[in-house]
Image: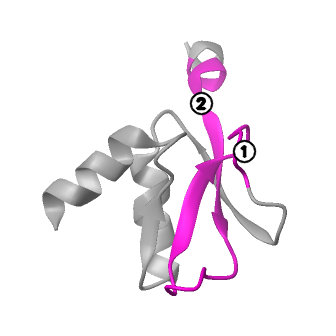
């Protein structure tokens, strides 16, 4: 059972440096728009939401990538 879970997990990262609006972005490591700059690893999860929560513990302004983490981004919009 653990092997199946590992196959479904993706590794997530957060941008170490904020963008011009002081926002940090969470991406999975295979995102087609993954920035080339410094990234901090968040770990492997089946969904993006736990990665976003973990990033929010470190940075005040965090947003999930609209391309690779759309479900987490929708969750953030509903919570706002």
List x then y, in percent, for residue 32: 71, 39
In the displayed structure, 39 sits above or below 77; it is below
List x then y, in percent, for residue 10: 63, 35
User: Any mark on residue 80, and which?
Assistant: none
State the quadrant of the N terminus.
top right
SS label for mark 2: loop
List x then y, in percent, for residue 4: 59, 13
- Nearer-the-camera pick, 48 or 73: 73
Callout 1 touching callout 2 (CB < 8 Å): no
State the quadrant of the C terminus.
bottom left
List x then y, in percent, for residue 15: 66, 70
Rate crowding at label 2 as few (under 14), some (14 to 19) or many (20 or more) other CA atoms within 10 Å.
Answer: some
Q: Which residue is mark 2?
A: 9
SS label for mark 1: loop
Residue depicted at 81% across the width and 72% down the height: 38
In the displayed structure, 23 sits above or below 74; it is below
Q: Earlier in the sequence, mark 1 or mark 2?
A: 2
Residue depicted at 60% across the width and 80% down the height: 19
Answer left or right for 58 relative to 35.
left
Answer left or right for 15 relative to 70.
right
Q: Which residues are magenta?
A: 5-34
Q: Which residue is mark 1?
A: 29
């Amino acid at each position: 059972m653990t092997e199946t879970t590992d196959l479904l997990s993706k590794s997530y990262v957060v941008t170490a440096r904020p963008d011009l609006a002081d926002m940090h972005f969470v991406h999975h490591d295979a995102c087609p728009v993954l920035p080339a700059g410094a990234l901090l690893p968040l770990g492997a999860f089946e969904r993006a939401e736990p990665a976003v929560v973990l990033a929010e513990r470190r940075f005040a302004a965090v947003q999930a990538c609209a391309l690779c983490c759309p479900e987490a981004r929708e969750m953030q919009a509903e919570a706002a």
